[in-house]
Amino acid sequence: MFRSGETDGRKEEVPVGVARTIERDHGEVMEALGYL
């Protein structure tokens, strides 16, 4: 997924349900990499 690169930009671009699914499925790795 490519975005504009703005901090928290996904909040305006990604539907809440999709964001929850991504965080549920990949949250551990995202947190380790500093995305959450």
Image: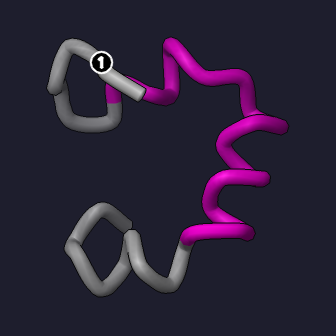
The color scheme shown is one colour
- Residue at left offset 51%, top offset 14%: 13
Q: In this rendering, is residue 5 above or below 22?
A: above
Horizontal and vertical percent position of residue 18: 75, 36
Horizontal and vertical percent position of residue 35: 29, 62
Quadrant hosting residue 24:
bottom right
Q: In this rendering, is residue 1 above or below 20?
A: above
| Quadrant occupied by the N terminus | top left
- Residue at left offset 50%, top offset 15%: 12
Give neighbour class at mark 1: few <14, some 14-19, many 20+ (Cα, 10 Å).
few
Horizontal and vertical percent position of residue 25: 70, 68
Give SS at disc 1.
loop
Q: Is residue 19 left or right of residue 9?
A: right
Which residue is outermost to the right?
A: 17
Give the residue type at disc 1.
Arg
- Residue at left offset 65%, top offset 53%: 22
Q: In this rendering, is residue 24 above or below 4?
A: below
The residue stretch that appears in magenta: 9-26
- Pointer 1: what residue? 3
Q: Main secondary structure of the magenta part?
A: helix
Q: Is residue 12 magenta?
A: yes
**Count of marks placed on residues:** 1
| Quadrant occupied by the C terminus | bottom left
- Residue at left offset 83%, top offset 37%: 17
Horizontal and vertical percent position of residue 2: 31, 21
